[in-house]
Structures are given as C-alpha cells and as structure tokens.
Image: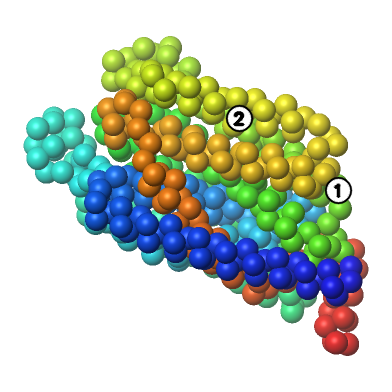
Amino acid sequence: MTGAAQDAARLRLDRIQRLALIVGIGALVLCGAGALMQPQQFFRSYLLAFVFWCGIALGCLAVLMVQHMSGGGWGLVIRRLLEAATRTFPLLALMFVPLTFGLRTIFVWADPAAVAASEVLQHKSAYLNTWFFLGRVVFYFVVWIGIGHLLSKWSHRQDSSADRSLIRRMQVVSGPGLLLYGLTATFASVDWVMSLDPEWFSTMFGILFMGGQGVAAMAFVICVLTLVADSKPLADVLTPTHVHDLGKLMLAFVMLWAYFGFSQFLIVWAGNLPEEIPWYVRRLAGPWKWMGLAIILFHFALPFLLLLSRDLKRNARRLAGVAVVVILMRLVDLFWLVGPNFHEGAFHISWMDLAAPVGLGGVWLWYFIRELKTRPLLPLGDPYLEKTGVAEGHKLQEQTG
C-alpha cells in the first residue's frame, strides 16, 4: 500500500473522530435542554443510550477473551479494535454518573412510597435498594476495567517483546474473565433493564443480553475494520478469508441471539403464569407488536439469509452494510425491551430516545478512535503474525524511516 493510501486512511479516522465529537456534544446539549423540560423522559432515554453503547463495549470484551482462549487469524485482525473498545470502560463509568440522579425516576423500586405500597417490592428490597445497586455498579466497572486493562497492557507489550509467556498470561486472565463477564453482564442486565419491571423475572434474560452484546460487538468491529482495512500494517495481513470468518461469526451470534430470545418467549408462553405473561402481552399489543415483527425480520431473518451467502461474507463493504443494519436493530430491540415499562404498554417515542444514543455514541466513538490510534492496528509480537513476516517488515520500515 502506498503512503498516500496510508495517509488517506488516517485522515478518514480523524474526520470521523471530529465529526463524532461535534455531533455527540451537540446532541447531548439538546438532551440537556430536554432534561430541564422533561427530566423523567431524559433519564429514560439516557438509560436506553447507555445500555446500548455499554453493550457494545461488553461484547468486545467477551469476544476478546474468546479470541485469547481460541486463537486464530480471525481474532488477529480485530484484536486491537476489541482492545480499544475495552479501554472505553472508564468513560462509560463516567457516563453512568448522570443516571444516579434519576434512579427514583427510572426505577419504581427506588421510590420509598412505591416500596411501602407493594409487598413484592418489600420482599425484594434486600437486593433492589439504591446503595446496594450503586455498589454493584462500582463492582461491575472495576471488573470490566481491570480485565480490559490487563489484556490490553500485555498485548501492547507484545509489540516490543518476544516473551511468549505473555500469551499464557492473557489466556489465564481470559478463562476466569469469561466467567466474571457472564456473572457481571447477567446481573447488570437484571439491574439496569429487568428491574424496570420488578415484579417480572426471567432466567433467560441475562444470556439473552449477552447474545445481543456479542451480535453488536461483531457488527461494530466489522464496520470499523472496513474503515481501516487499507491502513498498514493491517492491509498487509487482511484477506477475504479473514472477512469471511468474521461474517460467519456474526451469523453465529445472530442465530444465538434469536435462539435465546425464542427460548425465553417459549418458556413464558408454555408456563402461562400470571406473573410472567403481562410482560409479553404489553409488547405484543398495539404498535409494539409491529416493532417486534420488525425485530424478527431485520434483526434475524434478513441478516440470517444474507449471511448465508459466501460471496457477501468475503466482501468487506457488503458485509459492513449488513452489520450497520444489525447495529441499528440492536437499538430498536433495546427500545422494545425498555419502552413499554415506562408507558404502561402505550406506544411512545420521544425525540430524546434518538438524541441520547447519538449524543453518548458520538462521545464514545470519539474516545474509541482516540484509543485505537494510540497503537498499531495489529499485535506485532503475536506468534501467529510472525509466520506472515509482516511484523518483521513493519519493524524494519519503522527503523529505516
């Protein structure tokens, strides 16, 4: 690849980073004005946006740990993208802070008057109370930041060190890390989303969220990979085979998410219990049912059919097009899960439901690209990369100028 192409790729990232920050700040300013007029709606929309973007980072953390445990070229070309996403957890922790001022507005269990009037809330108050909730949030972010920091630090150290013990270190952390991810992601989904309706419960809810995070992460890294595919040293390694593998992984995550979602629905439908079925009744009535149908069609059916094509999965741009649809439908799916809890089943969309994801997303993307640009796009000391000869060639190029 020529130096001009390399510069063009860098300039492309710079433009996207600046645009993301400008749009993000602008949308957040609008949301701030909306908070003065409709504070209740602001906190509801902000929660939706936060869960969406935090889900992408969590999915990237999980995929990163799976890559360290399994190896393979598919993970080599996206590892630095995954690591950059995991380094956004400190920002996400900061983004959570505004929600602490609206807990009573968002969660009925945080309102003492509502708790006093409900035996169910009183029974669950040992778990669903403000201080224990905030303590769990701190614990979640400590775990996520800690795991991401270790994996990112040791991977970066590989660039200048041939120490193969680093590979083992990352594997040792990734094994228990996946277990911790499963536990923290499950409890976070219960705390942040399922407890919006504290009288309803599902044993499938956590794994359904993890499936969605995996889908979102794969779709996101495919989109970013397409943008940086012509940047060195990535351009010297990336082949249609890598893109094909990533497409197959996205297909697998789409199928897993659909399986988990259908399993939850089937369990509730078969049980037909009065404490479970109202959750689905609200989401299968009025305009909500059409949104549910759109999720089935565009979050599962269409991506599933398109990703069966081998030619599409080997074409980075076409695959990225499917990935964009999947990311948008992830937001729609989260809105379908969250929205009916706030409006007693009545369909309602506020402009802040659109502005908040754009605002948080713009700032998050700015920070993500900032982290991405701090390191080479490939782990240059990885043994698999050494077989291609790219690492040595890149180091020689740096030494000579």
Q: Residue at x 29, y 35 (%)?
A: 342
What residue is disc 1 on? 240
Crowd around label 2: few <14 · some 14–19 · many ≥20 (10 Å): some
Residue 179 visible: yes
Horizontally, residue 317 falls left or right of residue 52, namely right
- Nearest-to-viewer mark from 2 and 1: 2
Q: Quadrant of residue 245?
A: top right
Distance (Cα) linking label 2 and label 1: 25 Å
Please, is residue 126 above or below residue 12 in the view? Answer: above
Task: Please state which amino acid type lies under the numbered disc 2.
Answer: Phe
Instruction: Indicate the quadrant containing the N terminus: top left, top right, bottom left or bottom right.
Output: bottom right
- Seen from the viewer's position, the closer of residues 169 and 228 is 228
The amino acid marked with disc number 1 is Pro
Residue 118 position within the rendered picture, expressed as x and y whole percent measured from the top left: 13, 31
Q: Is residue 160 above or below residue 52?
A: below
Q: Quadrant of the C terminus?
A: bottom right
User: Is 263 rendered above or below residue 207?
Assistant: above
Which residue corresponds to mark 2? Answer: 298
Q: Residues within 10 Å of mark 1 (few under 14, many from 20)?
A: few
Q: Position of residue 55 (x, y in %)?
A: 50, 48
